Structures are given as C-alpha cells and as structure tokens.
Image (tube, rainbow, N blue to C red):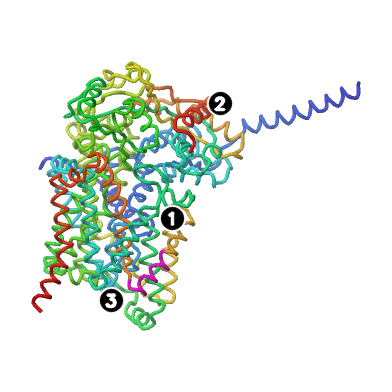
Amino acid sequence: MFKLLVMGLKIVLTPSTFLLIAAGTILGTVFGAMPGVSAAMAVALCLPFAYAMNPVVAIAFMSSVYCAAITGGGITAILFKIPGTPSNAPTTFDGYPMAQRGEAGKALGYSLIASAVGGQLAALAMALVTPQLANIGLKFGPSELFAVAFLGLSVLSYLDSDKMVKTLISGLLGLFLACVGMDPMLGVPRFTWGNSTLLSGIEMIPIMIGLFAVTEVLKETQDRSKLEALDTKSDGKMATVLPSFLELWKTKWTMLRSSTLGTIVGILPGAGATIASFLSYAIEKKVGKNAKDLGTGIPDGIVASECANNAATAGSMVPLLSLGIPGGNAAAIMLTALVVKGVQLGPILMKTQPRYMAAVFGSMFLTNIIMVIVSMLIAKIFAKILGVPYYILGPVIIMLATIGSYALANNTGDVVLMATAGIIGYAFVKLGYNPAALVLGLVLGQMCESNFRRAYTLTNGNMKAVFARPITAVIVLICVAMLLTPLFKSLVGKKKA
Amino acid sequence: MKRRNVILMLLALIFGVCATASGKAAGDWKWERKIEIICPWGAGGGADTTLRAFTSALEKVIGVPVVVNNKAGAGGVTGVEFASKQPTDGYTYVLCTPSPLLAQITGQTDYDVYGTIHPLTQLVHDVNIFVTSKDSPYSTYEELKEYCKKNPGKVKCGVMTITGLDAACVAAAWQGDVEAVAYTEGAQLNADILGGHVALGCVGPAEVSALIESGDMKAILSCTEQRLTLPKLDKVQCAGEVGLNAFFGPARGIFYIKGTPEAALKAFEAAAEKAVASKEFQNWAKEQGLDQRPGWKNTADYQAAWDKDYKDLSALFGKK
C-alpha cells in the first residue's frame, strides 16, 4: 500500500498535474460556493477540460473539482444561510447562527479544517483498504439502505424536543413532498395533477434555498433590532480564523465519527454526500458531547456536517475504482469521462493499472491542502458582502438565491418553487414548525421508501425477513432505542419528582 | 391552348427556380455557433455516454462546438419537454430512446412525446442481457428455469423502469417465473447483484463488462436474435437460440422539433453520418459492445423504425 501512496504523490506532484489540480480546486470551490451548482454539476462543467487530458490526469483533476466544490458550498451556507450544495444544508444549522453572533470567520475556519480532515481521513482509508471498503458497501442491500435512511429520519424526535408534535408534522410534510413524482417502484405518477414537470419530483435545491435563505431574509427584514446589530457587526473586513489545535482537539470524536460515517455512506450506491452530512448531524444530535446545544451555533455542528460530506466524496470513489460502480452522481460523471476516453473502470483495472487509484488518492490529498488556502481567499471575497447594510444585503441574498434556483435547470418553475418554499418557511417559523425537519424528510424520504418497498418485494412481502438481516436489525434496534430514550427519560424524571 | 402552355411553362419555371433555390439553401447551410444536444437522462448512463462520444466525433466534422445539456427527470419526459420549448433555429436537438415514448404509451405522462419530437438519425442500437452474481447456483437459461421451478417466487430481476424495455425483456424471457423489481439507479442494481441482494439484473453489456471480465458477474442470456460477439459473452445463450421473442434493446438517436430548418436537418444528418462512421466513434462503440446490432439509420429509416416501435409498444403495453 505504501507503494500506492508514493505513486499517487509522484503523479500529482508533476508540475503540470499539480497546476491542473490547483486550477480544479479553485474552480471547484468557486462553483461550490455558487448556490444551485451542485458538486456533480461542478464536475460536469469541468468535463470539457478533462476530455483534453490524459485519463490519469483527468481523474485527478475531476477529483479535485468534486472535493473542493463540497467545501466551497460551506462558505455561502455559513455567511448567507444558502447551502452552496445540498450537502452543506446542515452546515447552516450552526454556521449561520455563529455568523450572526459575529463569529463568521471562526465558523468558516472550523468548516475548512473539518472538510480537510474529513477528506484526508477518507482518502487515507481509501488508499489503504479500498477492496475491503468496497466489500462493506456490497453488504448494504435495500433493507440495510432503508435502515440507514430510517436512522436519519429518527433524528426528527431530537430536532426540537420542546415542539415534538410540530417537528414531526414538519418531517411528515417533507416525506409527503418526497412522494410527489413518479412512483419509484410501479412507475405511475403520484400527486402530479397531470403536470409533467412534477413527474420528476420536487427538486431539493430550490426548496432548501427557499426554506433557509429566503425565510431568513423575510425574518431579518421584520426584526429591525437584529438588522441593526448585523449592520454594526460586519464591516466587510471579516477574515477566516482557523481554530487552534486545542479547539480542534475538543471536536476529535465528532471528526472521527463523522469521517467514518461519511466514508461508509459515500461508498453506498444510492446514498451520497447529502445523506452523509444529514445523517452525521443527526448522529451528533444524539450522541455528541454538546448534543443539546447543536443548532444554536456551536462548532460541533459544522464539524459533523463538513467532515462527513467531504469524507463521502472520497468514499464514493471506492466502488468506482474497485468495481466500476459509481457511489454518487459526481462519480458517475467521472465514469463517463473515463469511458469516453476508452478506460474501462472495474476490478481488473485496479490490479493492472493502479495508477488511476493512486492519482485519485494523491489528488484528494493535495486538494485538501490547497483547498484551505483557496477557500480562505474566496471566503474573504464573499465576506465583503457582509459589510453591506442589510437593506441592500437582503435583496442581494434573494438575488443569489434566485440565480441559484434558476441555474439548476434554467427553469423559472424552480424559482417559483424557491419563493413558495421561502413563504412556507416563514410561516413555519412564525407558527413554530421546523423547516429543517421538512428538509430532512424530503432528503431521506425517497431513499427510505424505495428501499423499503424493494426489500419488501424481494422477500415476497415477508416483513420478518426484511428486518431479520443482521445489519438492518442492529440499525433498527439503535433507532428504536433512540426514539424511546426521550420517553424513558421523561418517565424516569416523573418518578423521581 | 398556346396560352395554357405558356402558363404551365411559366409555373414550371417558377417551381423549378424555387426548388433550385431551396436545394441550394440545403447545401449551403453553415454552422455558425455552438450546437446544443439535450440529454434527457443524467450523466454517466448509457444515453449520456453515447451522446458524449458522438458529440466528440461530431465536433470534428461540423467545425463548431457541440455541447451536451443533461435535463434528467421523469424517465426522459422532462428533457423532451424542455427541448420542445427551445428555439427551432437548427442549433438545438435532443437525444431520445423509446423509453419516453413508453411513458406516453403506458399513461405515465399525458405529454405527447410521439407528436412532439421527430427522428433525425439513429446512432446506436444497444442490447439487454441478464446477469447474476458469480455465486449463483445457475449459469444458463435452462438451469435458471429449473431453479425457478424448484424455488417458485424466489428469483427477482432488477430493472430500471418497471414499464420499460428491460421489464418487457423480463416478461418475455422468463414468462412469469421471474418478477421484475424496479431500481432507480443502475449503480445500486449492480451493487445489489454483486452483493447477492437481487438474483438477476437486466442490463446493457457496457455497464457490466468489467465485472463479467473479472469474474464477479456471469451472464445468463442475451436478449438478441443471435449470440453476441463480445469477449466473455460469445458463449452466452441468446433469446433467438432458445426460441424466445425477447429482443428489446434501447435504440439511441437524435431527434428534432418541428419547425427546424430543412437545410439544417439535412446538414446535421450528413455530418452525423460521417461522425458515426468515424474511426473514433466506431472504436468506442466496439469497446462498449454497441457494435452488436446495426446502429446508424438515416432520417427516413429512423422515422420508419420509430413509427414501428410506437405501433409495437402500443400493442404490447396498451394505451391506458
């Protein structure tokens, strides 16, 4: 394995390749920071450049774009509450409150370091144990994937324990929205009311931008005192403040948990960086040291989300390189580029041409270092907007949100969706419902439903067989234990009283 | 009489001039800016890969950039609908297969796919094969049939759409012994076959060739009239050989929207023929196993094949 590491570094440290990876990192970070441009879209936008490259260099270049895009998405999530990519949505939960308290620089610092650590740990795991990791991925069939999605959904009971019923209703509304479109199993339209646009389901990105960014602007516009506070706090000279070693050490378990989880979820075909970050945040909310304060603006929340989504990028390369099966959309685009170049990814390639794997490892290693510097510079540029008075900043955020929603598919329908989501989000906040719970339901709903129904069909409707698989049983038992804990605690509390 | 002759001659002359003028225009069509081809499916799949290989070859023939715009969703209908809203100035086309047509036929969408897009040139005609994990207790069609008899209801086959061409292959090949199960992502289907979570998969050879070559997967049957000539698949039985009428496979081609200038269509057809015949595209098609059936079809032939597909699939799936 040491040979592979040396080979990877040799490839990426060639001057021309190094420069291309640096360029890929800059492009990826900029694309990632643009709302509406997902990591997969960023890789697709860079495809024409990759076609002109040698295949080994091309995969190294595209890996750097992919990795950096996920990190870049954290910048706008923290500064403006606009998740650059869907996988940065949980970053807004703690990143934005920190920015509101005038700690935007610190929040960005945590986000960058967490991204780099998550990416590095996953890349290391990938380089050392790819075949074994790929085998873990194969053990996750429909019933196991259902259990993973259900684990993510079970966090609904923890998101806002004071308003449990309203949070659950919000989550269920998200699950309902996930049902809109073509039935994943039977291929019949559901809740489309004859509208062919709705056949492909409700787009996640405009909903997220609307619920987070637009709602926030509406809220801030009404809350005058808060506006003044924001105006005086930001003078446009915000700089990223990297956390000290001691501060980072305090989040070590969160980093380790999120990186491991991110890597594993990244490996699973059908999952990806978005599910990884939501799930990681969910787990942190349950087992983290500062679980109670999560969502109020603490570094642990940013670390959980950013570590996991970057680890998932490396994780999704594992099945691609070892089996020729892409672990996510961005990996699928990379596969296309290599196939067009005549490279047939698969188990044999890894044995006969380990250069591809080495190049990806080397690229991710290098990207995670360059990324910190590049992101700091880009964050500085974006932060200049923060110094602008809110009566100008608010419309600027709405403009960015509109462009992001439109850019997704050059479709005005998505802008309408974003605006509707923004208004619903505002009503949610006013009435005490939970927009984050709605997003969680929307993100995990389809994965949860289609895998459960698939597992049910594969076992000929034998419910016992669906849940009897060891991994599924363990995860479901964990879910049940976690769902019952608040109830148990309240019962014990009552007895003591 | 003379007067009538003069009028007729004059009419013939006017008609002739017009015909010559339009003929000249067709030959004179010059590509002045980039061409966009909409792919109604996501990046990484068979349709997208085919289109990208084609555009790469087409650019060299046509002399202007040809870009791919992925507009995935609703089994291809979203992309077709998006294409129909673009200007018909000769610079926007759409890739399509019979899948969106099937969505219309089976009543999944009210959108008139058949009436909106028109065939221009067929690029490739892919095939479907049945694959299973290396650990499965069956390796041939007969062995699987026997296994199904002993274990009724146990064997399920993963497909991408329950009302798609792959599901039609399952129904035709296994005649009720094997149930089709829908997967939304090919990656998950392949992983589930390898992991033993689903017994069979109906896929394209290119998607699994590396796994067959490495021995992690084995092919049971190809949905073709004759045996495939691909390495490692040439010994696999084909549907024609065992007397099954299960030959459905995705034909991928370029379509246009009514109103596109005739001259642009003629120029595109001529350039596409050269691009498909190019060494670059042919080598790629061979590597991908897309040389198993005649691929290229000109506008007239493709129109006829598209009309036949519409008729056959309507008869098979029934208009709901």
Of badges 3 and 2, nearer the viewer stands 2
Q: CA distance from mark 2 to mark 1?
A: 37 Å
Asked whether B214 or A348 is in front, the reply is: B214
* Residue A72 percent location from the top left of the image: 30, 59
Alpha carbons under labels 3 and 2: distance apart: 67 Å
Going by the numbered disc 1, the residue's amino acid type is: Ala
Three-letter residue code for mark 3: Gly
Residue at (53% x, 24% y) in the render: B301
Residue at label 1? A407
The residue marked by circle 1 belongs to what chain? Answer: A
Q: Which mark is residue B28?
A: none
Task: State left or right for residue B234 relative to residue B119.
Answer: left
Say what secondary structure mark 3 lies in. Answer: loop
Do the residues under discs 3 and 2 have CB atoms within 8 angstroms? no
Residue A397 vertical position relative to residue A9 in the rendered view, above or below? below
Amino acid, disc 2:
Ala
